[in-house]
Image: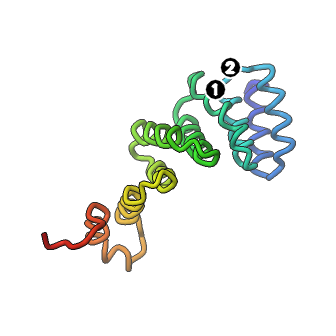
């Protein structure tokens, strides 16, 4: 394991242990020494994001994505960036980023949940409701909900009654 890799792993563990100040110190030092390292930028963004400092996280998410982040880290960065944009009221950027994530990772249903929040903020309440109902219909393990899965799926696409026309 390289020194860079071990330091990133240490920062991730510190963040997981809610020792954000220590994690941040390591990652800020690393990003100064390795400004274009996608993983370092991503982990720094995650650390800021986990502290609720979304405006600081955004640039590091963007930089990580621009510098070749891949796989699960890219998935996390697109979700984190889209969510952070929403938190700082950049709703258009949020929607575009979350849609991009959903297109790149079609199995990643979390994008629809966060996109529903953004759609709500954009005043697109019907689309927000459609996204959430569709997710519930596809993924709920609750037996009572499963019993009405077909109806919930129908209502996701037909929010406005009457239904007999």
Categorize mark 1 by other alpha carbons within 10 Å: few (<14), some (14-19), many (20+): many
The CA distance from mark 1 to mark 2 is 7 Å
Image quarter in which the C terminus is found: bottom left
Of badges 1 and 2, nearer the viewer stands: 1
Q: Is residue 46 left or right of residue 98?
A: right
Which one is nearer the viewer's eye here, 6 or 132? 132
- The residue depicted at 48 percent of the width and 56 percent of the height is 120
Circle 1: element type: helix
Q: Quadrant of residue 73?
A: top right
Image quarter in which the N terminus is found: top right
> Which comes sooner in the sequence, label 1 or label 2?
2
- The residue depicted at 58 percent of the width and 38 percent of the height is 77
Task: Look at the picture and state if 148 lies above or below 156.
Answer: below
Identity of the residue furthest to the left in this view: 165
Task: Look at the picture and state if 143 lies above or below 52.
Answer: below
- Colour scheme in use: rainbow
Disc 2 marks which residue? 36
Q: Are marks 1 and 2 in contact (CB under 8 Å)?
A: yes
| Residue 49 % position (x, y) | 70, 45
- The residue depicted at 76 percent of the width and 45 percent of the height is 13
Q: Is residue 29 left or right of residue 88?
A: right
| Residue 141 % position (x, y) | 42, 70
Q: Is residue 33 left or right of residue 137?
A: right
Task: Look at the picture and state if 98 lies above or below 159.
Answer: above
Identity of the residue furthest to the bottom in this view: 144
Which one is nearer the viewer's eye here, 120 or 18? 120
| Residue 53 % position (x, y) | 74, 45
| Residue 69 % position (x, y) | 57, 28
Q: Which mark is residue 63?
A: 1
Circle 2: element type: loop
Categorize mark 2 by other alpha carbons within 10 Å: few (<14), some (14-19), many (20+): some
């Amino acid at each position: 394991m390289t020194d860079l890799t071990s330091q990133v792993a240490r920062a991730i563990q510190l963040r997981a242990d809610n020792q954000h100040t220590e994690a941040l110190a390591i990652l800020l030092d690393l990003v100064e020494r390795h400004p274009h390292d996608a993983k370092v930028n991503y982990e720094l963004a995650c650390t800021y994001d986990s502290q609720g400092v979304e405006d600081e996280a955004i640039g590091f998410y963007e930089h990580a994505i621009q510098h070749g982040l891949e796989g699960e880290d890219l998935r996390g960065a697109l979700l984190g960036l889209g969510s952070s944009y929403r938190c700082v009221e950049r709703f258009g950027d949020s929607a575009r980023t979350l849609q991009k994530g959903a297109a790149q990772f079609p199995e990643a249903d979390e994008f629809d949940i966060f996109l529903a929040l953004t759609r709500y903020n954009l005043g697109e309440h019907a689309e927000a409701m459609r996204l959430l109902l569709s997710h519930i219909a596809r993924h709920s393990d609750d037996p009572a909900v499963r019993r009405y899965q077909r109806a919930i799926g129908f209502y996701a696409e037909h929010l406005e009654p009457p239904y007999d026309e």
